[in-house]
Amino acid sequence: MLPEPGQPEPERRYSFRAVTEGDLPLLRRWLEAPHVAEWWTDGTEASLASIREAMDSVSVEPLIVELDGRPIAYLQAYDPHLEEDHPYADQPFGTLGLDISIGPAELLGVGHGSAILAQFAQDLFDEGAPRVVIDPDPKNHRAIRAYEKAGFRVLGERTSQYGPALLMALDADEED
């Protein structure tokens, strides 16, 4: 339902749940979609293996994002201080990193990415995280715009295990 003219759009509320084995076929479809495959450059099988490994990890939390009970995105949070030689281990202790992919292509470009990140970052800040970082490919302009809309600011370019990355951060004390 659309808001009346002149009225603000209602706040979106997303739910986050742990990835299960039953989600892997859906994640496979998303990873094979051109808009996701373009940025998940390891290939579908390696990416699924990485997600499966993260399901048992202490340093990565793989999540399905749902809107009104419908899965719409994959989100993972990670602690760079729990991974040996992580390129973001120089961030303040307690910093958490995020990665996100919107699954259904028809949901791109309508504000879900920035809204999901803003809500999830606030949840992390409420739990005590001082900073949240995200690291899109510098060529992923759509993602960068969404992250800026969520309040992230550019810290600089880095090289991660996946190649060039634009490190962006959102600090707890920057939130309204």
Image: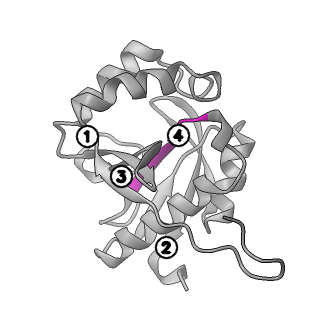
How far apart marks 1 and 4 lie (CA) works out to 25 Å
Q: Quadrant of the C terminus?
A: bottom right
Q: Secondary structure at mark 2?
A: strand
Residue appearing at x 57%, y 62% in the figure: 115
Note whether 86 is above or below 127 in the view shown: above
Looking at the image, residue 31 sits to the left or right of residue 96; the answer is right
Residue 174's x, y, as percent?
Answer: 54, 80
Residue linked to disc 1: 84
What residue type is disc 4 on?
Answer: Ser
- Which residues lie in the magenta part? 97-104
> Looking at the magenta stretch, what is its main secondary structure?
strand
- CB under 8 Å between callouts 4 and 2? no
Residue 107's x, y, as percent?
Answer: 64, 44
What residue type is disc 2 on?
Answer: Asp
Closer to the camera in the image, 63 or 95: 63
Q: Secondary structure at mark 3?
A: loop
Q: Secondary structure at mark 4?
A: strand
Answer few, some or many: residues within 10 Å of disc 4's Cα (few below 14, many 20 plus, some between 14 and 19): many
